[in-house]
């Protein structure tokens, strides 16, 4: 069983990486200062973003495993557990990282914005792959934050540090938008797979046994986190994954409504609705008419 290392404070993480604690709530990490180590399971009560420059084993988050490449940026939020697998021999960590306690951003604009950064909910196999130019910009931002940590603490310190962290996250959002476009080889065929998944779902008995397909269910079937999957679908189609699913429901419903041997309620249950009125409401929202009116018109 892997050793579990718990990081409750920034100082815990600094000690793990052989660093001096300049600020109790935030630190910039140079992993080359850490002592050689083997793989371990790490439980975070902190926000941690790290850019590693050496292959250090397979990172596992939940059920997904990611063969960790050089030049990738991984985001960890409080409550997440990361495990470095397949690394029993000693290795020397390398690269840089940012770690901060949630208390650092309380009362700042970042506290309100941080929930909007979906990449904290991405799996490690959905890490951010940086170009050389992007990597240098990340290192420059880390350097600005590190320089601020080395200054004497004053009334501006917290705001400046939090503002630079927010700027860093805003750039990461831009880089992820770029990644959704440039990594077409990785995401190629996602829409086709999504469409096939929905077609297969509605031609099976799953709607009766499981109900309507959720975004989380579809993402799981496609081995993606719900947020990453949702962001990819939004970039590709301009629609949310939920809207895409609902469009498919209506397409299937339109075909089945023509079967006059079945009542509208029967069709609703067959599609996975718990209550026929929910089906009728959605159908009218999307088509402008009720299922019965659609049947009569056609």
Image (tube, helix red, strand yellow):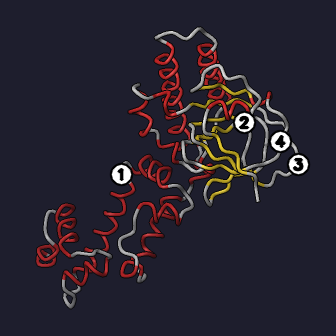
Dot 1 falls on a residue whose secondary structure is: loop
Quadrant of the image containing the N terminus:
bottom right
Mark toward the start of the polypeptide (2 vs 1): 2
Along the line of sight, the residue nearer the viewer: 95 or 206: 95
Q: Earlier in the sequence, mark 1 or mark 4?
A: 4
Measured as percent of width and height from the top left, residue 160 is found at: 49, 16
In depth, the one of 220 and 12 nearer the eye is: 12
Q: Earlier in the sequence, mark 2 or mark 3?
A: 2
| Number of dots carrying numbers | 4
Q: Are marks 2 and 1 in contact (CB under 8 Å)?
A: no
Labels 2 and 3 touching (C-beta < 8 A) = no
Q: Are marks 3 and 4 in contact (CB under 8 Å)?
A: no
Residue hosting label 3: 89
Q: Nearer the viewer, mark 1 or mark 4?
A: 4
> Pointer 1: what residue?
239
Quarter of the picture holding the C terminus = bottom left
Q: CA distance from mark 3 to mark 4?
A: 8 Å
Quick one: SS at disc 2? strand
Q: Residue 191: where, in percent of width, then height?
A: 48, 59
Q: Mark 4 falls on what kind of element?
A: loop
What is the C-alpha distance between the residues marked 1 and 4?
45 Å
């Amino acid at each position: 069983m892997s050793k579990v290392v718990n990081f409750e404070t920034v100082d815990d993480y600094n000690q793990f990486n052989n660093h001096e604690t300049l600020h109790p709530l935030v630190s910039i990490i140079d992993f080359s200062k850490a002592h050689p180590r083997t793989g371990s399971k790490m439980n975070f009560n902190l926000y941690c973003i790290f850019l590693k420059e050496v292959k250090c084993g397979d990172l596992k988050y939940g059920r997904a495993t990611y063969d960790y490449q050089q030049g990738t940026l991984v985001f960890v939020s409080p409550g997440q557990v990361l495990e470095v697998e397949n690394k029993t021999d000693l290795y020397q960590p390398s690269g840089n990282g940012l770690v901060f306690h949630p208390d650092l951003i309380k009362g700042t604009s970042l506290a309100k914005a941080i929930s909007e950064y979906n990449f904290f909910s991405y799996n490690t196999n959905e890490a951010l792959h940086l170009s050389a130019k992007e990597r240098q910009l990340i290192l420059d931002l880390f350097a600005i934050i590190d320089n601020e940590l080395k200054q004497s603490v004053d009334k501006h310190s917290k705001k400046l540090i939090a503002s630079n962290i927010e700027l860093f996250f805003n750039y990461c959002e831009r880089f992820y938008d770029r990644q959704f476009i440039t990594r077409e080889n990785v995401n190629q065929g996602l829409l086709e797979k999504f469409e096939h998944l929905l077609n297969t779902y509605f031609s099976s008995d799953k709607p009766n046994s499981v109900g309507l397909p959720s975004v989380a269910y579809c993402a799981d079937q496609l081995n993606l986190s719900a947020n990453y999957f949702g962001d990819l679908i939004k970039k590709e189609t301009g629609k949310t994954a939920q809207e895409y699913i609902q469009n498919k429901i209506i397409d299937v419903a339109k075909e089945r409504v023509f079967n006059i041997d079945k009542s509208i309620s029967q069709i609703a249950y067959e599609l996975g609705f718990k209550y026929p009125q929910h089906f009728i409401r959605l159908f009218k929202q999307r088509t402008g008419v009720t299922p019965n009116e659609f049947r009569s018109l056609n």
